[in-house]
Image: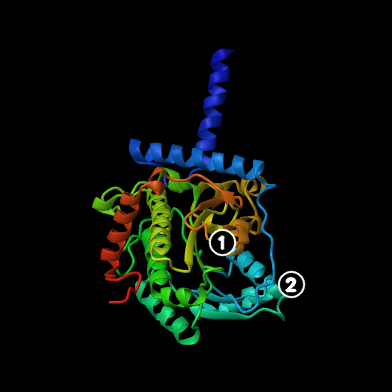
């Protein structure tokens, strides 16, 4: 009887492992297997926290006419719901998207359905966030049209995709989730600086993930060409976002700049971000246990507009509250190492545009 029980438990464990894998790819060695176990554990904890803290996951919307927000990837998933909430606040929104024409149709249709289409102030510009050339072109267009940007939401991202190098030779997770947003933030700092005041800081919001807690920066092989596993690449890029957020906020505080940065985990959200995971085999599990996109958008908007966060940059948020993250988050040496590494990789000489 005991053996039967053990067999049933093992069988259930194997099924859970297989159907909840971060990617459809199977681990090829013990290191990857351990990473996958950690990924599933941190995901399970995230789901439990989302359920237990559902009551805390709230954001109060209020009118902010005259403000301008820029979001990457705002035409689907949580991005679409973020845009809706910003429009409800009477905020003008710039969307950096791959296909502006298609994005315009999707967003306007959604807002019309929500009866917000007539009041929306939207601008659609072409952006491939994984291409540094595209980021520079996009930033140039924005700079030519807008003197100020009050809120920058670095939202676009990919998760656990197959190995691919961009045209510039960067692994796709790092290029899309970190490098592109790092460069965009650098290029738009003059607009953010012009928008911020002592009483109302401009805000940079980096949408990370709870998996930052198990991420490791592989500086010796940042593109992971020697031993690629999607989850490890994803975790690394999400940790990079956390360290980047903390470092620039420390510098803003030292320089007494009217800008603050926040990073966050939106929750375990049922969007097409999971299209490469094994959860696609059991979509009902995601519908049952994961947050929906609207719920996932709340912490992002909270980071962008909540008055109670004014002057409290550098924090990591989850379910609209300050939460714990990677052990390196409080390590200024590690934050600076990632920052300098990224500047060198992208050829950025003066990230903060300091006067000579």
Question: Gap in Å between the C-alphas at discs 1 and 2?
Answer: 33 Å
Q: Secondary structure at mark 2?
A: helix
Q: Position of residue 32 (x, y in %)?
A: 37, 41
Tell which of 203 and 356 is nearer to you.
356
Tell which of 287 and 344 is nearer to you.
344
Task: Name which quarter of the figure residue 327 lies in.
Answer: top left
Residue at figure coordinates x 26%, y 50% from the top left: 226
Can see residue 341? yes
Which comes before the other along the chain, label 1 or label 2? 2
Query: Pointer 1 and pointer 2: residues touching (CB < 8 Å)?
Result: no
Q: Position of residue 94 (x, y in %)?
A: 55, 77
Task: Report the mark closest to the observer, 1 or 2.
Answer: 1
Residue at figure coordinates x 61%, y 57% from the top left: 308
**Residue 316 in the image: above or below residue 327:** below
Q: Which residue is mark 1?
A: 310
Q: Assign the N terminus to one quadrant of the image.
A: top right
Q: Left or right: 112 with respect to 258?
A: right
Residue at figure coordinates x 39%, y 65% from the top left: 255
Q: Position of residue 216 (x, y in %)?
A: 35, 46
**Residue 24 in the image: above or below residue 200:** above
Q: Residue furthest right?
A: 115
Q: Which mark is residue 113?
A: 2
Task: Name which quarter of the figure residue 122 lies in.
Answer: bottom right
Q: Position of residue 180 (x, y in %)?
A: 39, 67
**Residue 15 in the image: above or below residue 1:** below
Q: Assign the C terminus to one quadrant of the image.
A: bottom left
Q: Secondary structure at mark 1?
A: loop
């Amino acid at each position: 009887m005991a053996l039967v029980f053990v067999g049933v438990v093992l069988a259930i464990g194997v099924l859970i492992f297989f159907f909840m894998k971060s990617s459809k790819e199977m681990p090829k060695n013990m290191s990857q297997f351990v990473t996958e176990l950690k990924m599933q554990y941190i995901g399970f904890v995230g789901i439990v926290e989302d359920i237990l803290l559902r009551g805390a996951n709230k954001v109060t919307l209020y009118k902010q006419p005259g403000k301008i927000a820029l979001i990457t990837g705002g035409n689907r998933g949580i991005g679409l719901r973020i845009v809706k909430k910003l429009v409800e606040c009477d905020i003008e929104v710039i969307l950096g998207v791959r296909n502006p024409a298609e994005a315009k149709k999707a967003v306007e249709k959604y807002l019309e359905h929500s009866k917000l289409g007539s009041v929306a102030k939207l601008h659609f510009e072409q952006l491939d966030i994984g291409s540094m050339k595209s980021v520079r072109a996009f930033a140039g267009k924005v700079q030519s049209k807008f003197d100020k940007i009050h809120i920058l939401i670095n939202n676009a991202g990919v998760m656990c995709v197959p190995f691919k190098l961009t045209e510039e030779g960067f692994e796709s997770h790092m290029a899309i989730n970190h490098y592109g947003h790092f460069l965009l933030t650098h290029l738009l700092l003059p607009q953010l600086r012009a928008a911020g005041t002592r009483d109302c800081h401009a805000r940079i919001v980096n949408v990370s993930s709870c998996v930052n807690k198990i991420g490791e920066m592989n500086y010796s092989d940042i593109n992971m060409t020697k031993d690629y596993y999607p989850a490890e690449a994803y975790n690394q890029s999400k940790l990079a976002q956390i360290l980047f957020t903390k470092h620039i906020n420390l510098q803003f505080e030292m320089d007494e700049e009217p800008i603050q940065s926040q990073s966050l985990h939106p929750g375990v959200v049922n969007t097409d971000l999971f299209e490469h995971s094994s959860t696609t085999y059991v979509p009902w599990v995601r519908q049952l246990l994961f947050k929906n996109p609207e719920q996932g958008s709340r912490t992002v908007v909270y980071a962008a507009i909540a008055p109670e966060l004014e002057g409290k940059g550098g924090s990591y948020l989850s379910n609209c509250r300050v939460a714990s993250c990677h052990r390196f988050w409080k390590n200024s040496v590690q934050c600076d190492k990632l920052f300098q590494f990224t500047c060198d990789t992208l050829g950025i000489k003066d990230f903060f545009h300091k006067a000579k």
